[in-house]
Amino acid sequence: MTLPSTRMKWIDVARGVGIILVVYAHAARGLVLARMLPQTGWPIDVDTVIYSFHMPLFFILAGLNIERGVARGRMEFILNKLQTVAWPYFLWSLVHGSLKIASTGYTNNPITPSDILAIPLVPIEQFWFLYVLFLCQLVIALILPRRWILVVLTLLAVVVWCSFSSDSIFFRALHFLPYVVLGIFALSLLVWLAERPVVQIAVAAGAWAGFAALILPVGPPAQDALTIYALAVLGSVATIATVMWLGAVIPSMTWLEVLGRLSMPIFLMHTIFSAATRAALKMVGPADPMLALVLVTIAGLLLPLFAYRIAVALNVTRLLGFGPPVAR
């Protein structure tokens, strides 16, 4: 099948949905830890649903363009990922960690200078995603185009992750590698699906039904390894098929597409602005839980966009790890 030569908008829209889920989930967890949201009931139920698939979704989407990127030049691809994934990881881990140390007493999970010194091997908080993503991209770039080796390595990673228990970041990479590889192998099928709205409805409905059937009896959190993988894949496929279908029936989804294209700066900065907003609300006094959740989530989504526009005006987007400027 011939792949589109232009940018596939549904990938950006899916990333937009994914980054909304990331910001919301971190906002909600922060409010729960700060005792500004209930510690039982719906916040935990929604958290269980979101965390069952939102990060695998990003890994699958990341895998869609790896093969074409490596085909243009292995070293060029690796150097690009050093600039766009590894560099933001180190820079913003330092920024985030330094801010948390400076605001000790106002944060939910304080860290120490030793935590910052350990970031080459032990990521802090949400930055594990960039660490794992870079490891997966590096390994895959060194293996491609030998797909059969990639399949064997992926199966081995699943067996090892299912058989052993470890908090190591390298074991986490073993867990998420299959999602990136799935993205590589699923690209042609998803391009085919993007042209067939009726099939999109059927796939979305079936995937959401399977997801619901699995997650409803599981409760928080899913523990069985196969169930974890199944929920992640079903939720991701359902999300992708849903955004494809919505793109066909809704005249414009530009705002979601923009969020998707700017998902990196939002990811890097959202917890800073969300935490600052949460701290301000706590200082003012008791706030309505739902209002607090809305305000903290909006701050995590929109304030990074304002900061990004300032970076564009100063021509420092690459320096800050945001990549080349994104057109409005």
Image (cartoon, helix red, strand yellow):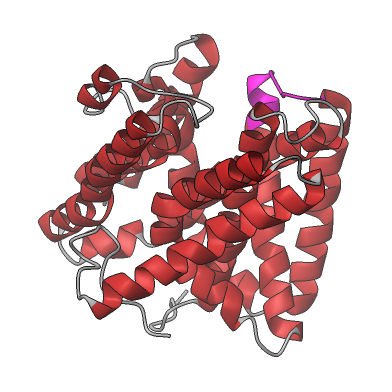
Q: Nearer the viewer, residue 301 or 321?
A: 301
- The answer to whether residue 34 is above or below residue 9 is above
- The answer to whether residue 64 is above or below residue 93 is below
State the image coordinates of residue 121 (x, y, percent, origin top left).
25, 23
State the image coordinates of residue 220 (x, y, percent, origin top left).
76, 25
- The answer to whether residue 9 is above or below residue 210 is below
Can residue 30 be seen at all in this image of the molecule? yes
Residue 312 placement: quadrant: bottom left
Q: Nearer the viewer, residue 60 or 98?
A: 98
**Is residue 223 located in the magenta-colored stretch of the structure?**
yes
Q: Residue at x 41, y 84 (%)?
A: 6
The dominant secondary structure in magenta is: loop
Is 324 displayed left or right of 44 in the figure? Answer: left
Can residue 25 be seen at all in this image of the molecule? no
State the image coordinates of residue 9 (x, y, percent, origin top left).
52, 77
Q: Residue at x 82, y 64 (%)?
A: 202
